[in-house]
Amino acid sequence: MPIQNEDREKHRDERVRLMGNSAIHYAGMAASGVVGIALVPILLRSLGAERYGIWIIATATAALVGAFDFGLPLALTRDIAANLNGDNQQQTIAFAGAAARASLLLGCIGGLLIAAIGVKLSTTLHLAAADEHVARVVFALIGISFALDRLVGFSGAVLMGLQRFALMNLLYSATALVRGTGILALLWYGGRLVSLAIWNAVAALITVVVALIIVGLVEPRFRGFRGGLRWSSLRSHLSFGLYALAGNIVARLTWEVAPLLIGFVLGAASIVPFYIGQRFPLAIGDVSWRITEVVFPAASAVAGNREGSRRMLEFSTRWSLVVVLPLCLMLIVLAPNLLQAWVKAVPQQAALVLRLMAAAVAAETIGAGAYNVLLGQGGARRAFVLFAGAAVVSAILSLVFLHQVGITGPAVALLIAVTFTSLLLVQMVGHKHGISAWRLLGQESGSLVVPLLMSAGAAWGAAQIGHPERWRGVVAAAAIGGVAYIIALYLFGGREEERMFLKKLAKFPAFLIRQAYGRLNRRASMPG
């Protein structure tokens, strides 16, 4: 009995740790996103539409080129998590060294490509003569930043493989904050677009140096990147990386292709209600993937352990449902109010599109954890085949439903395709570990029914009073629904580790206040 209790406490603490990692992992992305959103109106006002447009195109080009990284970061994360402390640790260290050099090489090639694209675009963007030169310089500087950022991505992959999510996200958040602060300072002193691009490159260089120092301190075996750019060290990992990359691209296209289909079939004006309706659900979908990414290195570390993999599957399925289902439910309940507050003149059928897309995100959440467990076990090829099939089915159904029911058709098609894909993912991974999809989903979601119903009821009731068509009314209704969900989860539907995590979250602000108060007292007591 003591051994069983010890195992139970160990597994509980492991789940609490993963919950904390997921919160940190999402907080890092959210912090970077907030900085980016805050800079938009400032850059537009300071640079003007034309030069801000140059900045947008240059950074978008870098993002597009950066998507083709051959899946090296994912492959590196998986290998470090699975093998660094095992019998194959020397091969892992050699792979890390080769991956660092490959990342730099890809960065240099990508940077040159971005600069070349800038030369071409500068003559086709209908710019003034002076701005053509500015565009070429900005694209070249963005290319330099791109090359350096590949090494930052390498460092992030290493830290993720080591499951050091706090350090990784602190690095990314600090990078966004430093870049944003520097841009604001330059604009304050009259800096223009080229000076912003120069600072962006300088900040990337500083980040690379800090990132590589952190990696060397956390894991000295990666200091100096032993070994050269050896094809033999990369070859065995490329298949996994390429399939994982292709799977991610196909999965993303499945969600993003609908506006194009609507435009081709019904015309450009018909895209607007669908585009507006999908924005908030897509943001919630990013939450789902972000919080379950922490399972990928953890599942890689226990890939050879059937019981450990099953625990990862159960945890990731449960945790994604706990976090994402109430968010999707809030969107479904508050859809008309949210759109009224956001765009005022709500296009017809936009609310229905929003609700269908929110349901599709909830369906995708069912399989998000299973996907990361499958990836951790090296199943990138199977995931790609499944996602490719779902993309084809979704596209065909979208075209059929477009002619039958109009712009809501692609949302219905996506809901059908995503639901079957998620169930197949859960069944595929669950079968390997002796549990069926229906049994897994039943045991992980059954206790959430009461909290979800209470949350929906509270949000709906709050939306009926006050000013539900204004932002403060929408935010208040969502907050009331969220509080109702947390209370009901704690009292009725939550598990032991979830209650422990909620207690830690509740104590965190008090911890920060105590730390700040202690530092102020120490400073006040210092002589002089």
Image (cartoon, helix red, strand yellow):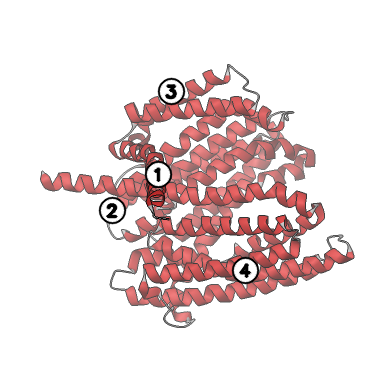
- Mark 3 element type: helix
Q: Check disc 4 and give the amino acid type.
A: Val
Can you identify the residue that label 2 sits on? 308
476 lies above or below 168: above
**Among the two numbered marks 1 and 4 on one chain, the one whose residue lies closer to the N terminus:** 4
- Visible residue check, residue 343: yes
Residue 95 location in percent, x, y? 42, 75
Residue 41 location in percent, x, y? 71, 46
Seen as rendered, the residue at the extreme top is 465
Can you identify the residue that label 1 sits on? 517
Q: Residues within 10 Å of mark 3 (few under 14, many from 20)?
A: many
**Among the two numbered marks 3 and 4 on one chain, the one whose residue lies closer to the N terminus:** 4
Can you identify the residue that label 3 sits on? 454
Q: CA distance from mark 4 to mark 2?
A: 44 Å
* Disc 3 and disc 2 in contact, CB within 8 angstroms: no
Q: Residue at x 33, y 60 (%)?
A: 301
Can you identify the residue that label 4 sits on? 202
Seen as rendered, the residue at the extreme left is 1
Q: Check disc 1 and give the amino acid type.
A: Tyr
Q: CA distance from mark 1 to mark 3?
A: 38 Å
Image mark for residue 54:
none
Q: Residues within 10 Å of mark 4 (few under 14, many from 20)?
A: some
436 lies above or below 447: below
* Disc 4 and disc 2 in contact, CB within 8 angstroms: no
Q: Residue at x 84, y 66 (%)?
A: 132
Q: Quadrant of residue 506?
A: top left
